[in-house]
Amino acid sequence: MIWPFKRKQEESHRAQPVGRVIRARYDAAQTTADNARHWAMADGLCADAAASADVRKKLRERARYEVANNSYAKGIVLTISNDCVGTGPRLQLLTGSNTVNHLTEEVFEDWAKETDLAEKLRTMRMAKATDGEAFALLAYNPALESPVKLDVQLIEADRISSPWAVSNGQDTEVDGIFIDAFGNPHTYCILRNHPGALGWGGEYDLVDSSGVIHWYRVDRPGQHRGVPEITPALPLFAQLRRYTLAVIAAAETAADFAAVLYTDSPANGEAQALEPMDIIALEKRMATVLPDGWRLGQVEAHQPTTTYSEFKREILNEIARCLNLPYNIAACNSSGYNYASGRLDHQTYYKSIRVEQAHLGEVVLDRILRAWLYEAARTEALGVLRGLRAIPHQWFYDGTEHVDPLKEANAQAKRLESNTTTLAVEYARQGRDWEVELHQRAKEKQLMRKLGLIETPPQIADEETEDDVEDRAA
C-alpha cells in the first residue's frame, strides 16, 4: 500500500520565463554514425528481465568455465573468499550475563566446527563471485553430535527454479522465488536434483523463506536474482588467454625453424636455383657451404612477445577493478610497488572486504544465529536461552597482518595513550575478543609471578626504519 500524500494546489497563475529559453542536451544521449554500433545492445529492460533465467544460466556456465580453466580467475576468486571469510567468523554475545555469553559462545563454536561452517561460508563466497548468488537451506541433521541438530546445506543456484510459469494478481514469480505484494520473498521452489544431473525428473519442493538463505549483490532496484560478479571481466579473461596462446604460438613457430635460406637477388637472377620450401636436415657441429647467392638466417618472433608483459599487466588491472582488487593482489605480484603505494592500493580493497563481511553477517550469519538460538533453547544445556530470539552480538573475523609490525605497534601505543581508541577496537583489528585476551593475559601474569619469573616490559623502539625513509621520499 502506498500512503496518499496531499499535493499543494497549483496557483492559477504561472511565472513567465524571463529572458531567453536555453535548450541543452547530453552528448552521450545522441546517436551518431560513430557510436551507433557501440550502443546497439543498450536496452530499457528491468533488472529481472535483463537478468533472465537464460541470461544468468549462460553467464554462470561461462564464469564457471573460466574459473575452472583460468589460473588468474581461480586465484582471484579464492583470494576474495579467503580474505572475506578467513578461518571463519567468531561469535561474541553482549548480554549482561558473562556465564551465558561464554557458554553460548563455546557451544556455538563447537557446532560451527562440526558442521564445517567456515568452509561452507567460503564456498558461498566463491559461488557469489562465480554464480552471482549463493543459497543455503537451514535443515535438521540428526547425525550431528552437537545438542543443536541444525545444519546448513548449500544449494547451487541452478536448483532454485520453477519448472512452470506462474502468473496471478497477488504474487510474482522470479525464476523459483515467489514474492508477495510488498516485495518480500515468501517461498522458494527448490529442485530435488540439479538440472544437469542424469535422470532428473523435474521433482521439486516448495520451501518457506524462513528456512532459505539467499546471498547476492543487488546492483539495481527491483533485482531478485544475482549476476556473477566477474561478468564484466569474462571477455577480458578470454582475451588474456587468447593473447597468451598467441605469444606461445609465435615462439613455437619461430623455434620450429632452425634456419632459413634467403637471397637478396631478384627472381630469375644470379642466385643458384633451389626448390621452394625444400627441407634440409642439419647435423650438429657441422660446417657447410651455401649455394651461390643464398644466405642463412633464423625466424624471430618480434610480435607479440615484445608487449606481452605490459599487456598482461594492463588487462589484469582492468579485470581486478570490477572486483575492487588492486593489481598486486590479483596478480599476486608486488614487484612494481613500493611500501607506500602498496598500502594505499590496499585501503580500497580492505574497505570492500569490511563491507562484504558486514553484508555476510547481516544476510547469512544473523539468520543462522537466530535459527541456532531457537534450536539451542530447546536443549537442556542451553535452556537459559529459551525465549531469546535476538541477542546483542557481534562477529569477529581474522585480522589483517601489518607489513611492518614495529610501525603498527608504535601507532597502536600512541592511539591508546591519546585515548583515541580502545582495547576492544585494537583487538578487533586482529580478529580477537578483548575480554578473552585480557583474561588469558591475567592468567599468564599470575603464573609468571608464581614461578618467580621477572617480566620485563617490552621496549618499543622509536627508531626510523627503511620504510619510513621510503614513505617520506614517496
Image (cartoon, rainbow, N blue to C red):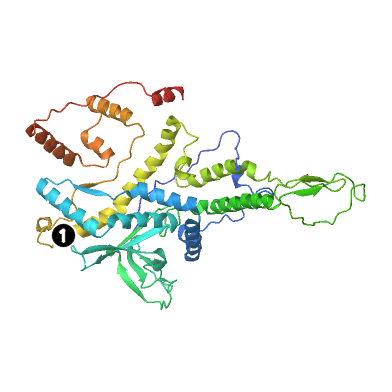
Amino acid on which the number 1 mark rests in the picture = Ala
Q: Secondary structure at mark 1?
A: helix
Vertical placement of residue 97 versus 277, above or below: above
Residue 170 position, x and y percent, is 36, 68
Which residue shows up at 15% across the image and 39% down it?
440
Residue at which label 1 appears: 376
Question: In this view of the protein, which residue sits in the foreground, 205 or 407?
Answer: 407
Task: Give residue 17's position: percent from left, percent from top.
Answer: 55, 37
**Extreme residue toward the front, this view:** 286
Relative to 183, 151 lies left or right: left
Does residue 71 lie above or below 15 as drawn? below
Q: Residue at x 41, y 69 (%)?
A: 161
Residue at 21% x, 68% y: name it: 143
Q: Position of residue 416 (x, y in %)?
A: 23, 28
In the picture, measured across the screen, residue 5 lies left or right of residue 267, that is left
The answer to whether one can see residue 284 in this image is: yes
- Quadrant of the rendering where the N terminus is positioned: bottom left
Q: In which image quadrant can residue 295 be found?
A: top right
- Most extreme residue toward the left is 450
Q: Residue at 32% across / 32% down in the picture? A: 405
Residue 199, compared with residue 117, is above or below; it is below
Judge left or right: residue 303 versus residue 82.
Answer: right
Q: Quadrant of residue 169?
A: bottom left
Task: State the image coordinates of residue 458 (x, y, percent, origin top left).
Answer: 22, 26
